Image: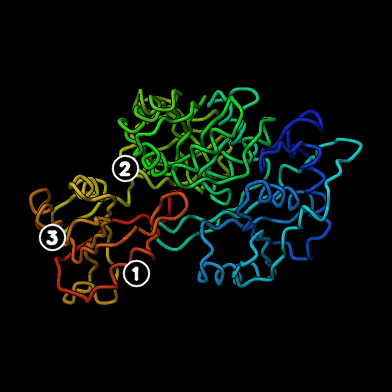
Amino acid sequence: MELEPLLLHRTAAAVVAFRGGRAVTAGEFLADANRLAACLPAGRHVLNACVDRYRFTVGLAACLISGRVSLLPSTHTAEVVRQLVLFAPDAFCLTDASDCDIELPLVRFPDESAHATQPAADYHPPLIPAEQLAAIVFTSGSTGAPLPYRKTWGRVAACVRGAAAALGLPAGAVLVGTVPAQHMYGLESTVLLALLTGNAFTAARPFYPADVRSAIDAAPRPRVLITTPVHLRTVLADDLELPALDLIVSATAPLSHELAREAARRFGAPLLEIYGSTETGQIALRHSAECLAFTLLPGVRLRADNGQTYAYGGHVEQMTALCDVLEQSGDDTFILHGRTADLVNIAGKRSSFGYLNAQLNAIPGVQDGVFFLRESDHGDGVTGTPRLAAAAVAPTLSSATIMRHLRRRIDPVFMPRPLVIVERLPRNATGKLPQQALQALADRRPRRTAQTATHRRSPRSLS
């Protein structure tokens, strides 16, 4: 039976995490994980909802040690939890929040102040069977209902090792993450990337620009920021001086060349962008400030068949359809052109959501905006087909003003019905916009007759 280590820290004194201004050693981490594993209830499936990244990682390790499976949906809404109960009736929730309202049997993370951690006298990191089911992750729901994907420990470990080698992660690196550990990207790049390279991570998940700067400042060098285009854009919007980094890693959405160059310049560090999905994990990298092409991780290959691109090989568990339009530029390189779900056809005219969103966000005064396909039982009231809608964060503008600007920028058939002004878009923790949340925005307005719309949609969500 093939075995993979839980962590690669060579001594009990090696640092695994920085939490609350204190370095947590590998010996302490294993003691915490073993203690938690011993007090978990009988259920095999665990919804790990811990916000503190260290506590999440202890929970993950406790599940691996005890043969349990971590359930990792990207959100914890009542509907998602309801679906989890149907999927895994024995599931319980591990939480570190005193006010957790998730409707599952709750297990509170043990109070650290009540149990001073005593590292074991003998330091022996556990070995986990490669075929052991480590987690079931779920797509974000950005193109529909979340779908589950099973992740074995051996394949996940292989993915992370391949990414670490491609990233050129500096020895002794400290990872500062703005993304939640429950997301596939966050799991791989802010937790497992530290455990499986002998490096460390910070427990906090900073959100606001000032918090991101403080978290970076508090981490010793070399330090790496694991983030998203949404977080980068927000941090760079301030003119304040930014702390130096040794590497920036971005994922979850395509990063523009301009934003990548600005981030690299302001932080004084190289920037690498990860391409991947919930289904496949991380499969490619590119230097976004320098080139368009992504390079596949070792062993991963692409195959095109009837307009659909598939990933296979390496750590990818099976031949997997990708939700993007890719142009292979070499045996191990490709250019990303956009999502297959991005195409929109209205009244015989074609455009893309990427183009429409760019036009909306280019309007002075629009801070954030998105077009989306409105789905309703009655569609346009005549044919029953879906229609376009849009939402915008624009405190100083009216809907009428934005519509006037849009008429100058896009074909009339793509004008949104309705256009909703909101205080903020319902982005999740990785900056994505789940379809259900967008539909709720459109439903705030009365239905109106609009153009007939047809849309080519992907059956899967790329995360």
Label 3 sits on what residue type? Ala
Residue identifier under label 3? 347
Q: Position of residue 43 (x, y in %)?
A: 74, 65
Residue 220 versus residue 276 in the image, above or below: above
Q: In the drawing, does residue 40 fall left or right of residue 214?
A: right
Assign a secondary structure to mark 1.
Answer: helix
What's the residue type where badge 1 is placed? Ala
Q: Nearer the viewer, mark 3 or mark 1?
A: 1
Q: Give the CA distance from mark 2 to mark 3.
A: 22 Å
Residue drawn at point x = 39 percent, y = 27 percent: 266
N-terminal-most mark, 2 or 3 = 2
Query: Contact (CB < 8 A) between labels 2 and 1?
Result: no
Q: Residue 347's quadrant in the figure? A: bottom left
Whichever of callouts 3 and 1 sits on the residue coming sooner in the sequence is: 3
Name the secondary structure under disc 2: strand
Q: Nearer the viewer, residue 5 or 12?
A: 12
Q: Residue at x 29, y 51 (%)?
A: 368
Q: Are marks 3 and 1 in contact (CB under 8 Å)?
A: no
Q: Is residue 42 left or right of residue 219?
A: right
Q: Residues within 10 Å of mark 1 (few under 14, many from 20)?
A: few
The residue carrying mark 1 is: 440
Mark 3–mark 1 Cα distance, whole angstroms, equals 25 Å
The type of residue carrying mark 2 is Gly
Identify the mark at residue 338; answer none if there is no mark. 2
450 to 5, vertically: above or below: below
